[in-house]
Image (cartoon, rainbow, N blue to C red):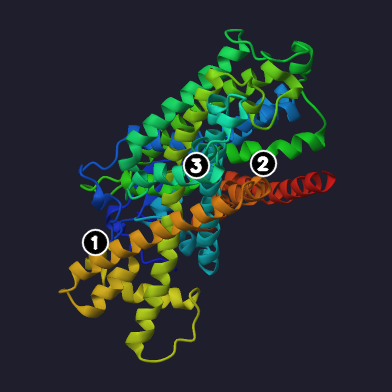
Amino acid sequence: KKPIGRPLKQSNISIDTEIQHTFAGMYGSIPIPSHKGQGTAATNMKSNKGASIASGVVNLSNTIVGAGMLGLPGAFGGTGWLSGIFLIVLSATFSAHGLVLLSKAACLTGRPSSFYSVARASVPRYTILIDLAVALKCFGVATGYLITISDSMVHALDHILLTGDPTKDEQFLISLLLSRQFWVFGGLVLVLPFSFYRTLDELKKASALALVFVLMLVGTIIAYANGAADPCMGNENGDDTCRGEMEPYTNFPMTLAKLPIFVFAFTCHQNIFPIVNEMQRKDTMLLNQRRLNIVICCSIGFALVLFSIVSLEGYWTYGSLVRGDILLNYPENKQVTFLRVCIAFMLALHYPLQLDPARRCITSLVNVIITWWYQKQSKGGNVSKTLSGECFGNIEMEQEESSEAKGRGLSNASAYYEMSHGDDEPKKVDENEDTLFYIITLSFLLLSFVLAMIVDDLGVILALVGATGSTLVSYVLPGLIYIKIYEPMDLSKLMAYVQLGLGIVIIPLALYFIITKQVSH
């Protein structure tokens, strides 16, 4: 049976035409190529069936449902409740569609998959830039988590420890516990135990615990919105200054200015590839796209319901006076203080979900450099070709000969190393892989810690990262990669063009409104 997709000249994929397997996607069928080098993530799984659907839903949901939802009520304050509902549903829809496009691209290019592997098959000249962009985006968000953890703990302890007596409040221990730098270090200690897991499936328990903290946050917002607690307690002028007006919509510039917040809230696309790898079935070497679609729909659907509740309830509580971080609206009391502590622990559990995709991207970049270096040394001369284009083709041709090594789950560089040094080197290869894993992890943690210690406000930087990085990962790359890989023009490819077009429009608009807002202030 003739394959539906376009042959991938840039990838080391062999498609066995005698066993073409098709699966039902959202808009039709796409063939799943058989790949000689199945591996890495799946080989770490204890079960022969790979990760479960529940594990995928928990981890992907936890990636989506983070601190970003605290800004959604403020986004509704700028758009109005009717426009806000439209934008949040639209963002959820295109986020789910982007995840489906990337998962299909992963199946077409073979596993183990990553942003690097699918980009190499579709836009090989830009693979390094794409991996670098994803890694920097995740690094920025993870650093923001450390800063938010420190700020949340300082605000919480400020309410608990300060008595108003200068002699007691200026004691060394009190000053230390109210120091932002102390809690940046404390945040690093919190995230450290979860930072060395090799698969997202191993993080499912931590992700489930983080979702408990999320539900506690949602419960508090609902309680204040429905009169179970007084949202204006401590306000001298009463409800008149606590609550603003509610509007169904506002003006067009204000609505567009809030659009990146909705896009950023549903960004989780960097983690779809490890989920794809871990959910593969080792006995058949095939990935069931329907199982992936269930994971995507359940995760996005759960986040959409949760975000809609938080947005509407928060907006109905404070109206147009709702702030960018809704916690800043609530009175300083024991309940809100406890909530801040929960948010700190929640973000500590979210941190590894940013570290993991960044580590995978950095590992891909390092492996490309190492492979190129081994190739250069084996030829005994200067290699004038760059790390893209033709160089990739040469590396891949030589890697075909090392399919046996790759079948054991080795990276490209490790497979090439084993091919060059013989079959007596697997232990050394494994040690090299472990060494690289720990070096990248520790470097990420150290750099993130140092930046969080130096900078106390990443608001503008994170806004720029969200407007560019999140839109790039959620809209531009899924559309572009799928268009390049999948040849037939059908509804799925048409929607990929729409996804790409939206991303191209959103990035300059978001940057314009972020910059003009900063200039006006």
Farthest residue, direction front: 167
Q: Answer with mark 3 or mark 2, whichever residue precedes in sequence.
A: 3
Residue 130, percent from left and from top: 54, 60
Label 3: which residue? 183
Visible in this render: residue 399? yes
Return the disc, 1 or 3, that comes first in the chain's sequence: 3
Q: Which of the pair 268/155 is nearer the observer?
A: 155
The N terminus: image quadrant: bottom left
Which residue is at 75% across, 38% downward? 256
Residue drawn 54% across the image and 56% down it: 136
**Residue 244, how many percent across, how many down?**
77, 18
Disc 3 vs disc 2: Cβ atoms closer than 8 Å? Answer: no
Q: How far from the left and from the top, in percent, is residue 298?
A: 44, 30
In this picture, is 73 found above or below 386? Answer: above
Taking the spot 20% from the left edge, 47% from the top edge, the residue there is 283
Check residue 260 in the rendering and tell me which mark sits there, or answer none: 2
